[in-house]
Amino acid sequence: MRNRSAIWIFTVLLFLACLYQLSFSWVTRSFEGEINKEAVAKCDTVLEDILSEGVSYVVDDTLTYENDIDANTETIKENFDSA
């Protein structure tokens, strides 16, 4: 019976420590939800741009999406011709 108050103090401190740790989970979940919405919106706009205008991103002076398709088409034709 003498340690009853010590047990209650330990229980309350443990409860507060658990709430403190859970608060990080709640904040992180909220932040991830907001970032996920922004990422989906960004992907949608990029996909709409690609579908409406085509891909015109230039990586080098010589490498574009169109050049990559031409190179792949030539490789496929060569593979069919050799078979």
Image: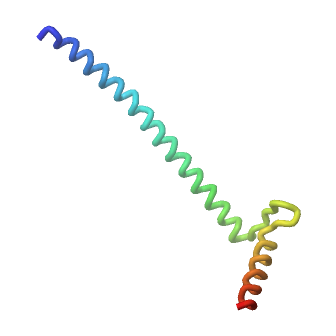
Q: Quadrant of residue 82?
A: bottom right
Question: Quick check: 5 left or right of 32?
Answer: left
Q: Residue at x 72, y 85 (%)?
A: 79
Q: Position of residue 73 (x, y in %)?
A: 75, 81
Q: Residue furthest right?
A: 61
Q: Residue at x 20, y 12 (%)?
A: 5
Q: Position of residue 37 (x, y in %)?
A: 54, 51
Q: Quadrant of residue 45?
A: bottom right
The number of discs equals: 0
Q: Residue furthest left?
A: 1
Q: Residue furthest top?
A: 2
From the viewer's perspective, is residue 31 above or below residue 66?
A: above
Q: How is the image coloured?
A: rainbow
Quick one: quadrant of the N terminus?
A: top left
Q: Position of residue 68 (x, y in %)?
A: 77, 72
Quick one: quadrant of the C terminus?
A: bottom right
Question: Quick check: 49 left or right of 12?
Answer: right
Q: Nearer the viewer, residue 42 or 64?
A: 64
Q: Residue at x 56, y 47 (%)?
A: 35
From the viewer's perspective, is residue 53 above or below residue 35?
A: below
Q: Position of residue 42 (x, y in %)?
A: 63, 55
Q: Residue furthest front?
A: 82
From the viewer's perspective, is residue 46 above or below residue 76?
A: above
